[in-house]
């Protein structure tokens, strides 16, 4: 039966309708959405929106003149202000927000477009604004705090590592009193150290090469001849038999030195005697003597001087004595002359320096490698120790030296002035 009491109107029986609200007019603020991370503002907190006026060229497509960039609210204890960077990050998420407002009298829900971006607010406590922020902890304070935590809560292994680190740490405060004495001691000891130029001169003087001139601008002046062949030995060389053989086109006596034979044979084929011909023949004779000396003295146990004289009976004794004194070593209490590795390096430097002079300071390493029964790599290394550069000769230079075109790809050892010695490599080869 129907009740006699008056009932309220049932809202479920009312029909709802939606209506799209108008866009904010030019210059108006319109509804704004804000977010309060980790803190909720009181309901009675007043908020204001501030904007800067855009220039004409900055107007949006819809003709908007104002750029709403700042939302500010103030409560009795806290201030709120929008964070532009965080708000832009939220806008870049791609979400667009709308507000729906229901009117209970008309049962209409009005959809209101909001601002383009939600505003993310940050807070500032008023009571803390006058307090200066603490400085970042120093490295020492951080290290002390970390050590205290490790000693309190660390494992046995961590505590042992902390104690080892403390033992190895230098007490700077204790060093302040003696620092000046340490610096003075270093300066006093450093006075005896060599400078860069002095160290270079000392290293050059220890090189197993003939005496050289580092400032010479002509390759002929880098290694003077009288420093390689002493004058008494040079005068003792007898070239009359060689000149006779060259005159009669006879056989040359050095079967183990084709490099010398090729040069002598080429000199015998020349119609006119060139200037300095006898001097060059003497140098070639001395080179052949050095070849013979190398074959004679290259004995693992060494040789007596009389044995060397016997095997080199056709060589003047003054030359044999000079070769023995410069390129062999004797141990204490022994008369055996040994051809050690250091003496071998020195001997090769003197020999190749003479070969460069005969070849007009551009030698072919391959021919000498065959005569010396050595690899081309070792011969090239010996040439580099003299300051030579390995390179191919251009066509014009080959023609001036009388070399065939078949040697266009052959690398010659060329002595360049002023001389530059190779530097020691640092680190491992990659």
Image: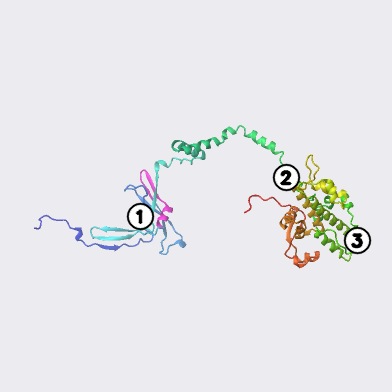
- Structural distance between the alpha carbons of marks 1 and 3: 116 Å
The residue carrying mark 1 is: 33
Q: Position of residue 354 (x, y in %)?
A: 81, 55
From the viewer's perspective, is residue 182 above or below residue 199? above
Residue 260, magenta (yes or no): no
- Structural distance between the alpha carbons of marks 2 and 3: 51 Å
The residue carrying mark 3 is: 244
The residue carrying mark 2 is: 199
Who comes first in sequence, dot 2 or dot 3? 2
In the foreground, 65 or 109: 109
Which element is circle 3 on?
helix
Query: Nearer the viewer's eye, disc 2 or disc 3?
Result: 3
In the foreground, 73 or 399: 399
Report how many numbered discs are placed on residues in the image: 3
Left or right: 17 in relation to 298:
left
The answer to whether residue 289 is visible is: yes
Query: Nearer the viewer's eye, disc 1 or disc 3?
Result: 3
Is there a contact, CB below 8 Å, between mark 2 and mark 3? Answer: no
The answer to whether residue 218 is visible is: no
Which segment is the magenta one?
72-91
In the foreground, 371 or 44: 371
Which element is circle 2 on?
helix
Please say which color scheme the image uses.
rainbow
Query: Nearer the viewer's eye, disc 1 or disc 2?
Result: 2
- Structural distance between the alpha carbons of marks 1 and 2: 77 Å
Q: Position of residue 294 (x, y in %)?
A: 79, 52
Left or right: 387 in relation to 316:
left
Left or right: 252 in relation to 377:
right
> What is the quadrant of the N terminus in the image?
bottom left
Who comes first in sequence, dot 1 or dot 3? 1
Choose top left, top right, bottom left or bottom right for residue 382.
bottom right
């Amino acid at each position: 039966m129907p009740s006699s009491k008056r009932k309220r109107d049932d809202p479920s029986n009312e029909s709802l309708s939606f209506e799209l609200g108008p866009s904010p007019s030019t210059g108006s603020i319109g509804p704004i959405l804000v977010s309060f991370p980790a803190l909720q503002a009181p309901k009675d907190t007043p908020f204001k929106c501030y904007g800067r006026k855009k220039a004409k060229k900055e107007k949006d497509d819809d003709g908007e003149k104002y750029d709403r960039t700042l939302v500010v609210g103030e409560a009795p204890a806290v201030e709120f202000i929008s964070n532009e960077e965080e708000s832009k990050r939220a806008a870049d998420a791609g979400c667009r927000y709308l507000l729906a407002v229901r009117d209970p009298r008309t049962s209409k829900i009005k959809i209101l477009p909001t601002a383009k971006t939600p505003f993310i607010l940050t807070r500032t406590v008023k009571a803390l604004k006058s307090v200066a922020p603490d400085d970042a902890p120093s490295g020492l304070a951080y290290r002390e705090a970390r050590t205290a935590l490790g000693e309190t809560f660390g494992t046995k292994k961590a505590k042992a590592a902390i104690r080892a680190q403390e033992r190895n740490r230098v007490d700077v405060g204790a060093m302040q009193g003696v620092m000046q004495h340490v610096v003075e001691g270093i300066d006093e000891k450093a006075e005896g150290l060599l400078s860069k130029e002095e160290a270079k001169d000392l290293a050059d003087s220890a090189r197993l090469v003939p005496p050289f001139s580092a400032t010479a601008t002509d390759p002929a002046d880098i290694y003077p001849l009288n420093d390689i062949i002493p004058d008494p030995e040079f005068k003792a060389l007898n070239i009359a038999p060689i000149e006779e053989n060259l005159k009669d086109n006879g056989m040359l006596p050095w079967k183990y030195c084709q490099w010398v034979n090729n040069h002598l044979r080429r000199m015998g084929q020349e119609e006119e005697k060139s200037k300095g011909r006898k001097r060059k023949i003497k140098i070639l004779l001395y080179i052949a003597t050095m070849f013979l000396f190398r074959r004679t003295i290259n004995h693992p146990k060494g040789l007596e001087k009389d044995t060397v004289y016997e095997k080199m009976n056709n060589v003047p004794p003054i030359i044999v004595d000079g070769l023995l004194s410069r390129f062999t070593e004797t141990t204490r209490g022994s008369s055996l002359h040994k051809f050690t590795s250091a003496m071998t390096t020195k001997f090769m430097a003197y020999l190749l320096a003479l070969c460069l002079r005969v070849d007009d300071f551009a030698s072919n390493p391959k021919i000498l490698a065959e005569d010396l029964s050595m690899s081309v790599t070792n011969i090239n290394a010996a040439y580099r120790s003299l300051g030579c550069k390995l390179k191919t000769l251009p066509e014009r230079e080959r023609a001036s030296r009388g070399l065939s075109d078949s040697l266009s790809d052959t690398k010659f050892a060329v002595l360049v002035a002023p001389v530059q010695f190779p530097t020691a490599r640092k680190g491992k080869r990659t």
